[in-house]
Amino acid sequence: MAITIFDHPLILDKLSRMRRKETSSKDFRENLNEIGMLMVYEIFRDVKLKEISIKTPTVKKAKGYTIETPVVLVPIIRAGLGMVDGIQKIIPTAKIAHVGLYRDEVTMKPVEYYAKAPADIDSSYTIVVDPMLATGGSAVKAIDIIKSKGAKNIKFVGLVGVQEGIDALQKAHPDVDIFLACKDPILNKHGYIEPGMGDAGDRIFGTK
Ligand code: PRP
Ligand code: URA
């Protein structure tokens, strides 16, 4: 399916603030949430609307709209959690499914430690969020997990990705649209993106 790289000036400005080594956890989190919000705002441009009838203070019947399909956000714990607040600000009814994964430091393969999804995920518009798409292993595994729970209409939203991760995700889940704020050139031998922004989870939660 489609891959969209935003490369939008507002997003690139915020992303550069996040990349800087000296940026505090607070600023890192704020910019991450804002970018998540901006990306989802744009991604929702083509979401299905249902027409409804509403009353306003001046008329008894006016045409209104509501988003028809329930929305489920799936942050990949930990770093994906850093995008939830920003997106929920603009979609307050979104439910949250959690998938907990960490990358084994030697094999770089994702290890699952938690998974919980709402019962109606099968009929929802499901958005998997994680700032980093490196080898792609975590995104592939998270989507395997939510598909096993019934999710069908799935999008992946990340900030920084590399070609290796994009290829892995497209190969494993060709039905999933991929949205990235930008694409970086290098996945180093330790599985980190260059220039990237370091370990996103550690930067969000101040663990290093
Ligand atoms: C980071 C990041 C992604 C994953 C990306 O998580 O948040 O989930 O690495 O790498 P991949 O594409 O090679 O799988 P990490 O495993 O460091 O866990 P954390 O979020 O708890 O820090
Ligand atoms: N996970 C991160 O947090 N950063 C990277 O650069 C790669 C994977």
Image (spheres, rainbow, N blue to C red):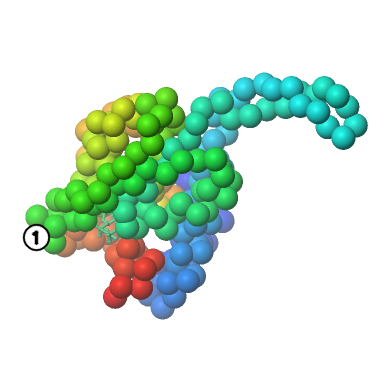
> What residue occupies the far front of the structure in this picture?
119
The quadrant of the rendering that contains the N terminus is top left
Q: Which residue is drawn at 37% across and 32% down?
A: 119
Q: Residue at x 32, y 63 (%)?
A: 201
| Viewer-closest of 50 and 160 | 50
| Viewer-closest of 172 and 60 | 60
Type of amino acid under label 1? Val
Count numbered badges in the picture.
1
Dot 1 lies on which element?
loop
Which of the 4 quarters of the picture holds residue 207?
Answer: bottom left
> What residue occupies the far bottom of the structure in this picture?
22
> What residue occupies the far right of the structure in this picture?
58
| Viewer-closest of 118 and 48 | 118
Q: Where is residue 48 in the image (x, y as percent from the top left)?
A: 56, 25
Residue 156 visible in the current orientation: no
| Viewer-closest of 152 and 186 | 152
How crowded pointer 1 is (Cα within 10 Å; few <14, some 14-19, many 20+) is rated as few
Q: Position of residue 41 (x, y in %)?
A: 56, 43
Label 1 near ligand 1 (CB < 8 Å): no
Q: In this view, does 128 lie above or below 193?
A: above
Which of the 4 quarters of the picture holds residue 123?
Answer: top left
